[in-house]
Each structure stands twice: as C-alpha cells, then as structure tokens.
Image (cartoon, grey):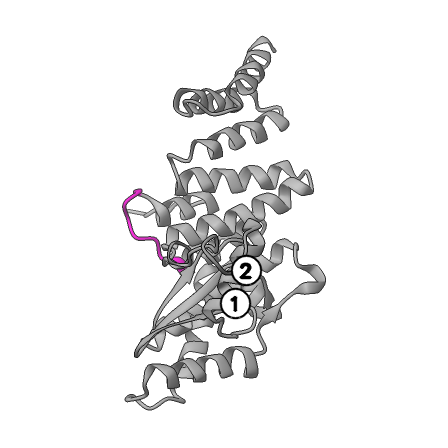
Amino acid sequence: MSLHYTVPTALEYFAALVTPRDAAVPLLETAACIAQIEHPQLDVQQVLADVDALQARLARRLPHDAGALQRLRALNHFFYGELAFAGNPNDYYAPGNSYLHTVLHTRRGIPISLAVLWLELAQGLGLNAAGVSFPGHFLVKVRVAGGQVVLDPLTGQSLSQDALIERLALLHGQPASGAAAPSLTLYLQPATARDIVARMLRNLKEVFRAADDWPLLLQVQQRLVLLLPEAWAEWRDKGLAHAQLDEAQQAMADLQLYLDNAHGAADTAAVAELLRVLRQR
C-alpha cells in the first residue's frame, strides 16, 4: 500500500501554528513563516536551526552559574557586537526587514524582527525576557535582581524611565513631567507571541498598502484573520483587498461579516454602500 502525503500550503502552515485561538503561538517559528508570503518555498525549519546554532555558540561562552546581568551582557556583546545586528535605516520599509531569514543573512532589520531573534537567544540563556509593544517602537525587557531592564532592540541600549516617559510624551503631545506626564505601567506590559506576530503583519500591511501591492496585502490579511479571528477591521480590510483584485464573492463575504459584527463603527455606512455596489455587479 502506497502512502500519499499532502504538503501544506504556506497559509495552511501558518494556520496550524496559530489556531485554535486560545493556543500558545510558537513565536520564532510563526514569525519566520511570515516570509512565506513572498517566499513560499522557504525552509522554516532551516531558519530555526540557524537560530539554534547561534544559541549554541552563545551558551558555550557562559558558566552555568552566570547571573542574569552577566548573561544579558554576554548576549548583547554577541548579538550587537560580534554578529553586528542593527537597524536598516537606508531601506527601513523594505519587506525583507520583517523576514527573519533575511534578517539573519543581512544582520539588518527593524525593532520587532530584531527583537524576535534577540528574545529567542535571551530565553535560551534562561533570561526572563519579554517583548513590549511600546507605541511607535517595539522594545524588549529583562527581569534582573531588583527590577527590570528595558532595552531598544535596534541597539541593545538600556532605556531609563525618564527616556521612556519622554518618548511617550512626544507621541502623545504631553509634558514629560508633572501631573499630565504619561504613566509607563500600561505601556510596559509583556506582549504575547500572538501580539508580536500581529504587529509584524501589520507592519507589512502598511508596506504593501503604500505600494498598492494588493496580492501581497491580501496574503497578509489572510494571516491576520487567522491570528485574530475577532478583529473585525481585519476582515473588512481583507474584503477590500479582494475587491481590489476583482474577487467579488470573497469581498462580499468578508464585508458582510464585518458589518454583522462591527457594531457602531464609523465606516459601516461606507462599507454597506461598497457591498451594495459589489452585489449590483
């Protein structure tokens, strides 16, 4: 008797990693397979193996009884010094900055893609590290004796409380001191793996939308609704991408789902009008 195996598509692979909704998402593997949007034949397991090899190199350099600060310093020296990971200011909005296999090759990325790799190495060293969905710039943090250290994943630089408050104040147009100064507590909560993958996808969403690349934008939206099935605005945007690609049936289904669930949204009248036009066609 012959056995037949069906190789999952890139989208099916992603779906298997992020469903059901209450399941834990494997951050590194899920983030790595985002690149299959443009590189469907990418060997994600090789990406994981490449990171494991870096982890093994780093772990050999530390004694087993190394403290958290010693491990953190060794990680940053290895990641930013020896391997020279950094931002990519000359081509910041290139999609490859969000693709982990590309970031591993070029050693250049954006805060969140660098953070995913850094976090994998940090957690492999036994550090209590987490991502932070800080507004405008993804951060990482590590628990150490007596508190926590918050770092910029572009540089590994630690950020003081005053520096973080100043960043928030600039974003919100508030003073950096006094009664109106923003509070950091809410903004330094650890991000879940699902949150991190969603932010990576939304970064790509803006890149492809700016380029009017509707086929790739649709692939992003297909993943976002799998990851966040009750984020109704993502269903709306998936429907809009289908409409741009003249895929009326799929567009109507997604837009109707949005209208059925996005009660009170400001754009429901406009979406309903688009749905009416699509049905007339």
- Distance from label 2 to label 1 (Cα)? 6 Å
Please indicate, yes or no, whether residue 100 appears anywhere in the rendered image: no
Q: Is residue 19 placed above or below 100 in the rendered structure?
A: above
Label 1: few (<14), some (14–19) or many (≥20) C-alpha neighbours in 10 Å: few
The spot of residue 24 in percent (x, y) is 30, 53
Q: Which mark is residue 226?
A: none
Q: Residue at x 54, y 62 (%)?
A: 166
Is the Cβ of the residue at disc 2 closer than 8 Å to that at disc 1?
A: yes
Q: Which residue is mark 1?
A: 163
Other-residue count near label 2 (Cα within 10 Å), few / some / many at <14 / 14–19 / ≥20: some
Q: What span is colored magenta in the figure?
A: 20-27
Q: In the rendered structure, which amino acid carries the disc numbered 2?
A: Arg
Q: Answer whether residue 227 is magenta in the image.
A: no
At mark 1, the secondary structure is helix
Q: How many numbered discs, if any?
A: 2
Classify residue 184 by image quadrant. Answer: bottom left
**Quarter of the image where one finds residue 232:** top left
Identify which amino acid the numbered label 1 is placed on. Ala
Q: Position of residue 231 (x, y in %)?
A: 42, 35
Q: Residue at x 30, y 77 (%)?
A: 146
What is the residue that sits farthest to the top in this orientation?
A: 280
**4 versus 120 height, above or below:** above
Q: Viewer-proximal residue, 217 or 7?
A: 217
Q: Main secondary structure of the magenta part?
A: loop
Q: Is residue 24 magenta?
A: yes
Which residue is the extreme one toward the front? Answer: 178
Residue 194: x and y, percent?
A: 38, 50
| Circle 2 residue | 167
Quarter of the view holding residue 258 = top left
